[in-house]
Image: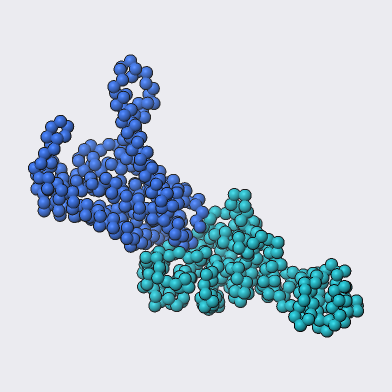
Chain colours: A cyan, B blue
């Protein structure tokens, strides 16, 4: 059984009459790169702030590598929303201040600062004022700060927000490398589905403050979490196809597909059963092309109906 | 790591951060200059006499009195204005700039963060007092004589008392910072507090004057609670933060003001800790 890096149980947080996070339960295993997904305003950042005790929770428990409270934060390096620095100080001086707060002795702070600056490729700019850094460099400096310690769990809130494609790729590669080579468990909040699909092995999808789905990315993409399939049917008699499916409530015609096919959404029916039913109805089939699901499909299914 | 050692490390980190601020260095420079100007002014006055209390009064032209003058000018809200500015930047300013959040992500108790900031403000004030003392002593010894009523010991102790008063004032600034969470709010709240305190002191002074001038038969009918209130002025923050004046003049200490100084500091620290522990940090 794998060790659990982060366990959240029954987490609630309300702002006035609005429930920002409702009965949140999630588990992140050691070694996971966990994608925490949700539309804007779903409660991702509030949940992260509650986990990191920046804001108080109304109820619920958080365990990080079995520890709670301040002891739990010893295991964590984090970036919450846009990182902030003392702009008049150098990048290195900012990190050395953070060393003091991380409990790293002054004797070790210099070497630790060099280590993290090198890890994010900023060693050559360490002496420059943080205010002179580009947005991408600030993001890397923030990751460097989060890596002080080093942490066992890295919590990143929208780490590629506002970065250009090159910067996004650099951060993505860095996160991937941290998980792979440094064996750091990563908890990554994002609304960039392609990014999450590219680097995460597990995801949790939050909508309106509630965790709607949690599981392995491969499982979710295989459709086990949802009985819905999208399939394109090629037939020389599309009118006949449309006539038949209009009487079958499990099947919805979504519109034209590629190469003249018809695009169908099938609920609660496996594809072989669909084919059998069409054949029995006398619909001649030329091709059946199931659409490969991606995280966006899963996300939209889970969050459909929730306000954006 | 040992908790005490860690707190020391936090204080040192906050001191290094605070001294790197332009406003902190400007404050030191301004207060060092203030160490030179009052003794120089006193030397310029020379044997001039002024009328005070109905008769001519000559200035005490001793070097120790020159240093005391510098202390008096410093405490005419000049050092306190810098402390207010730095305290507001240090807590509320960092709250607004979100840099406080980065510190609180670390495994430190919030009271230690406050303690470190208070320690850094106290250290800044200590350096400011010391700088001003050195400059004032050099200028006074060069320009003024050694004969006079002021004593070096009392003036030195007055500087130490002024530093103690600053640490108490810094605790109140941090309380205002924690309560308002904005730098401008902190400055406004402290100004309001000082103004109310002064107003209350003035009311008590007027009230005591009226009370003392009442005819005996009317005086006897005044409720005891009024008398208790009228003798409360030594407890006011402005009196507590002004104990340096009595100390530097070798006057007997006003126990109520010393008690008040300790009480204000402890109460402010406790209230700040309670507020900050419950503060949601964005």
Q: Residue furthest bottom?
A: A286
Viewer-proximal residue, B67 or B118? B67
Q: Quadrant of the C terminus of chain A?
A: bottom right
Viewer-proximal residue, A294 or B41? B41
What residue is shown at x 34% (from left), y 46% (from top)? Answer: B168
How far across and down, in percent of the image, does residue A268 sit? 80, 69
Q: Quadrant of residue A109?
A: bottom left
| Vertical side of B151 occupied by B2: above or below | below
What residue is shown at x 51% (from left), y 54% (from top)? Answer: B280
Q: Going by the image, does B104 lie left or right of A30?
A: left
How far across and down, in percent of the image, does residue A96 sit? 39, 67
How far across and down, in percent of the image, does residue A228 sit? 76, 70
Q: Going by the image, does A165 lie left or right of B254?
A: right
Viewer-proximal residue, A259 or B186? A259
How far across and down, in percent of the image, does residue A274 sit? 84, 75
Q: Going by the image, does B61 lie left or right of A113?
A: left
Q: Quadrant of the N terminus of chain A?
A: bottom right
Residue B154 visible to an observer of this rendering:
yes
Residue B4 visible to an observer of this rendering:
no
Q: Going by the image, does A258 lie left or right of B144?
A: right
What residue is shown at x 31% (from left), y 57% (from top)? Answer: B24
What residue is shown at x 40% (from left), y 65% (from top)? Answer: A87
| Vertical side of B239 occupied by A204: above or below | below
């Amino acid at each position: 059984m794998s060790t659990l890096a982060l366990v959240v149980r029954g987490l609630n947080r309300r702002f006035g009459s609005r429930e920002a996070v409702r009965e949140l339960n999630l588990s992140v295993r050691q070694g996971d790169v966990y994608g925490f997904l949700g539309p804007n305003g779903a409660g991702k950042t509030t949940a992260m702030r509650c986990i990191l005790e920046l804001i108080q929770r109304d109820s619920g428990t958080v365990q990080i590598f079995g520890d709670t409270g301040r002891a739990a934060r010893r295991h964590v390096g984090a970036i919450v929303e846009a990182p902030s620095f003392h702009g008049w100080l150098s990048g290195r001086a900012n990190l050395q201040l953070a060393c003091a707060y991380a409990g790293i002795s002054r004797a070790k702070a210099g070497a630790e600062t060099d280590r993290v600056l090198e890890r994010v490729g900023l060693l050559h700019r360490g002496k420059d004022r943080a205010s002179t850094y580009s947005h991408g460099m600030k993001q890397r400096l923030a990751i460097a700060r989060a890596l002080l310690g080093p942490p066992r769990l890295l919590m990143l809130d929208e780490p590629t927000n506002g970065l250009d494609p090159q910067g996004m790729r650099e951060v993505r590669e860095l996160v991937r490398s941290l998980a792979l080579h440094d064996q750091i468990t990563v908890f990554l909040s994002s609304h960039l589905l392609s990014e999450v699909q590219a680097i995460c092995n597990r995801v949790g999808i939050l909508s309106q403050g509630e965790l709607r789905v949690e599981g392995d990315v491969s499982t979710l993409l295989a459709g086990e979490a949802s009985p819905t399939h999208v399939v394109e049917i090629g037939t020389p008699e599309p009118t006949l196809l449309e006539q038949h499916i209009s009487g079958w409530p499990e099947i919805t015609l979504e519109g034209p597909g590629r190469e003249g096919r018809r695009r169908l959404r099938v609920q609660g029916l496996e594809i072989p059963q669909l084919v059998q039913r069409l054949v029995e109805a006398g619909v001649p089939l030329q091709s059946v092309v199931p659409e490969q699901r991606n995280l966006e499909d899963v996300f939209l299914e889970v969050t459909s109906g929730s306000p954006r | 790591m040992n908790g005490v050692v860690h707190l020391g490390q936090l204080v040192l980190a906050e001191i290094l951060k605070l001294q790197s601020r332009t406003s902190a260095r400007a404050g030191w420079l301004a207060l060092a200059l203030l160490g030179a100007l009052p003794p120089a002014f006193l030397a310029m006055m020379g044997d001039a006499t002024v009328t005070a209390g109905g008769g001519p009064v000559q200035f005490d032209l001793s070097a120790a009195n020159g240093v005391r003058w510098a202390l008096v000018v410093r405490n005419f809200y000049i050092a306190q204005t810098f402390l207010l500015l730095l305290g507001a930047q240090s807590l509320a300013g960092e709250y607004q700039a979100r840099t406080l959040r980065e510190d609180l992500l670390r495994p430190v108790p919030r009271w230690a963060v406050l303690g470190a900031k208070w320690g850094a403000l106290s250290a800044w004030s200590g350096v400011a007092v010391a700088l001003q003392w050195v400059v004032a002593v050099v200028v006074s010894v060069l320009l003024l004589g050694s004969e006079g009523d002021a004593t070096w010991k009392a003036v030195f102790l007055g500087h130490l008392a002024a530093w103690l008063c600053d640490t108490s004032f810094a605790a109140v600034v941090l309380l205002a910072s924690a309560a308002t969470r904005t730098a401008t709010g902190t400055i406004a709240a402290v100004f309001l507090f000082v103004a109310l305190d002064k107003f209350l002191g003035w009311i008590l002074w007027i009230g005591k004057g009226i009370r003392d001038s009442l005819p005996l038969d009317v005086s006897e009918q005044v409720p005891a609670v009024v008398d208790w209130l009228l003798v409360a002025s030594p407890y006011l923050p402005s009196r507590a933060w002004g104990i340096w004046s009595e100390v530097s003049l070798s006057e007997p200490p006003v126990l109520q003001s010393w008690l008040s100084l300790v009480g204000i500091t402890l109460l402010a620290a406790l209230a700040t800790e309670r507020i900050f522990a419950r503060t949601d940090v964005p």
